[in-house]
Image (tube, helix red, strand yellow):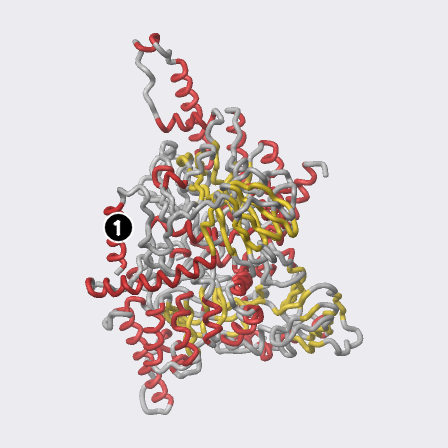
Amino acid sequence: MTNSAFSMITKTFTASLLGLALLAPTAWAEVTALVGATVHPVSSDPIENGIVLIRNGRIEAVGSDISIPEGSRRVALDGLHLYPGFVHAATQLGLTEISSVAGTVDTTEMGSINAAIRVEVAVNHDSELLPTTIAGGVLSAHIVPGGGLIRGTSAVIGLDGWSWEEMVISAPTAMHIAFPAGAVDNNDNEDLKLIEEVLDQARHWHQARAAAADGNAHMPARNDQLEALGPLLAGEQALILHANRYDVMEKALDWAEGQGFENIILYANPDVQYIAERLARDDIPVILRNVYSLPSRRWEPYDMAFVAPKRLHEAGVRFAIADTGGGMDVSNARNLPFQAGSAIAHGLPADAAMKSVTLWPAQILGVGDELGSIEAGKRASLFAATGDPLEPMTHIQQVWIDGEQYDLHRDRTLRLYERYRQRNANVQGR
Amino acid sequence: MRHLIFSLSVAALTSVAAHADWTPDIEAWNSPMPEQPAAVVVRNATIWTGTDAGVLENADLLVRNGRIGAIGQNLTVPRGAIEIDGDGHHITPGIIDAHSHAAIIGGVNEASRISTADVRIRDVIDSESINIYRQLAGGVTAINLLHGSANAIGGQMSVIKMRWGASPAELVFADAPEGIKFALGENPKQSNWQAAEPRYPQTRHGVEQIIRERFQQAADYRRAHEEHPSGRAGRDRVPPRPNHELAAIAEVIHGERDVHSHAYRADEMLALMRLAEQFEFTIKTFQHVLEGFKIAPQMAAHGVGGSTFIDWWMFKYEAIDATGYNPALMHEAGVLTGLHSDNPELARRMNLDAAKAVRYGGVDPHDALKMITAWPAAQLGIDHRTGSLAEGLDADFVIWNGHPLSTRSLVEQTWVDGRRFFDREADQRMRERLEQERSELIALALASDDNSNGNGNADGSDSPERRRVVHSFAAHLTGYRPSELDHDEFCIFHDH
């Protein structure tokens, strides 16, 4: 197992290859039947009094009229609503614990060229932030590196596991380039020149290596950074462009298209609404960075950021809603669904809002077969709530990750509550 | 271009400032103070009173000359009253934010001496902060402008009403009790940065000591002044030297100035309560109060309120035990509990923070709403005027198009003193006018300024050589006045 897992983490892999059954306790061989809830597959209409069958960590069947195998473990969820776990489209969860304590922060490597950074290897699977995030229904996340111009590769992970290796769903998911804002009106921008220079070097390096493989040249010296850019340059890996002003976004897209990149995802703040038509035309999906933003410009309407999802949707852009992914938004990644809820108030249709934090991020990140909806074959990562989970007043009562019921008491904030509630009651003689 | 617009507005200010009735009209969203109608009635709404009267269905709210005239069903109203159809709408008291830095000119922190009790927010209120308008659009009607948390004894706060279009002096909430910001823990002891010259204290027990020392000095100061003979008898004696810092602290220990103390940990809060008890006064609120739940019974016994974030946690070591259940626990223990923003972006959606108090610990929704209305008003000592809806109180209220604690609801109108300061329909109309005006200004700017590059003041964080430390809410923003993005730089640790 160790050997096979080791080889797999070097390239994209899926859990179906993981051979989870080998590792799994025998209980996994059994079938769990979640019954009685209103099932919200997200990919299709809600099912009243629905049944979800789970086997070996995956959803085996979903419906109202399916037979439950004998010996299944039945979980009654009458009155509750089942939803797929939220998929956080861009965050630094696992890379940071307490932002003011440097020793706990691994979000931002120094230097400009960090192509060979693999973010998943620094995910602390026992981070205290993860159980609290899970308690909010966010069950998987795209973990994004934060340092330099070429920042390295990201990974989609499930938020529970005994190691980062077990948590990885997709890695490397995409190469990240932070497009320099200064390049908008300066064709000699040094940062952009550096990026281009490194990409050219990488192209040459890979040509040389291919030539060497054919016996036509000597093998070039190993170069971790240039080697890591191979899948991107070969068109096998998505490019995620970071840009946070509409003119920077446009310039970044012009540049990336000029470089010949075809699989581009734009990771951008609400300014992205101003280039929605182009994004729809070129079919470039967007990870929307933070609906809960002040308007980019002082003179803009108060709801400038709140309406960004609606504008993208109306223009026909594929998008996922995320928060800033850094700072306070890491410890509060659990608030992701409320951003989608607020987008409804500002004109985004409710079903689109739900998809923007479940199915769409999964699809945009290339894990649409694994996550994002309650459908047969997907990972059984879902939760039962008292109502609409885009509403803060709703309670999330039970969570399953890869078919296993999650112990919500791992949430530190809940443990403190129960401990001190008891203590305060004792003090007051209640 | 930004500079041109700025200089145009400065020119407008200087050329017409002499007119008493001047209202700013060149910058976006500025508008004159709205009229105060003699009578307004909102019919058939769901009214969340913020009082023991509870939530009233199909009720009317009558406003007369800026005050609430009556609440009830089928109210008889004066002839000529403005009628608003509230069917399907909810009315709540205006939101009160007990911890804000959203409209302060020239630095939130006087980060110098350990005690700066002599400095006053009142002198530096920014009545043109766009945050005022934006927060009205989120239902906020009064905020408490506080200094930052750099100093154990900060400065004198100022409670303002969100009277967009009024002058700084007119914003001040005249009836609000005087107050002062204190701060405990990591910030006054300078834990999270390298000070060029370290300042005493560097520990929590040092913070407690320096506050006690100032209390002692202030008591002596007040006594010296009181003992100085008045009239003829005092004429031949040298009076005690005036000291504005000790004078303000003397007001604190004599119960004439409320203490609102930034604090996270249980130990430091307990220590400040005990210190206050030695000097026979009560701390008014702890701000942030993340570990309030650990000493909630002691807080209730002392009589201190808790003004907290609903769910901010883990951003610094002293926030490691923060929990979203804190408001529920403090409230259950009998602590006067409120939620605050401390952030101009978050302040626009405080209703959703109240909704989280329902999620974390099952607080009753009406009580959760009181955590952003009636109870912060009581913490600030302005509950005799605002924070709830009852006859005789100021007509500070919000009309929502749905349940006020739902993400799906929007503020339709926000009224302060019976004046409609925010109206979504009017806002939509204003956008069209401003778009036209902006086009004209851009044309002017392009004709006169070829240095225009469109770059923002807080932008460029993706560019290593220009990377600066900015708060996440302020990243990538353009054209703002510095005061609008100001914050307590010692309070929230930066993420870049």
Measured as percent of width and height from the top left, residue B65 is found at 50, 41
Measured as percent of width and height from the top left, residue B273 is found at 53, 32
- Say whether residue B118 is left or right of residue B37: left
Residue at the spot 36% in from the left edge and 52% down from the top edge: B30
Q: Quadrant of the C terminus of chain A?
A: top right
Quadrant of the image occupied by residue B470: bottom left
Measured as percent of width and height from the top left, residue B266 is found at 55, 39
Q: In terms of depth relative to the viewer, which is nearer, A261 or B434?
A: B434
Neighbour tally class for label 1: few under 14, some 14-19, many 20 plus, Cα within 10 Å? some
Q: Which residue is mark 1?
A: B12
Q: In terms of depth relative to the viewer, which is nearer, B370 or B191?
A: B370
Measured as percent of width and height from the top left, residue B485 is found at 37, 51
Q: In terms of depth relative to the viewer, which is nearer, A137 or A337?
A: A337
Residue B155 vs B475, above or below: the answer is: above
From where the camera sits, is residue B476 visible?
A: no
Residue A240 vs B7, above or below: the answer is: below
Say what amino acid the circle numbered 1 marks: Ala
Total number of numbered discs in the rendering: 1
Residue at the spot 68% in from the left edge and 78% down from the top edge: A60
Q: In terms of depth relative to the viewer, which is nearer, A243 or A210?
A: A243
- Say whether residue A184 is left or right of residue B407: left
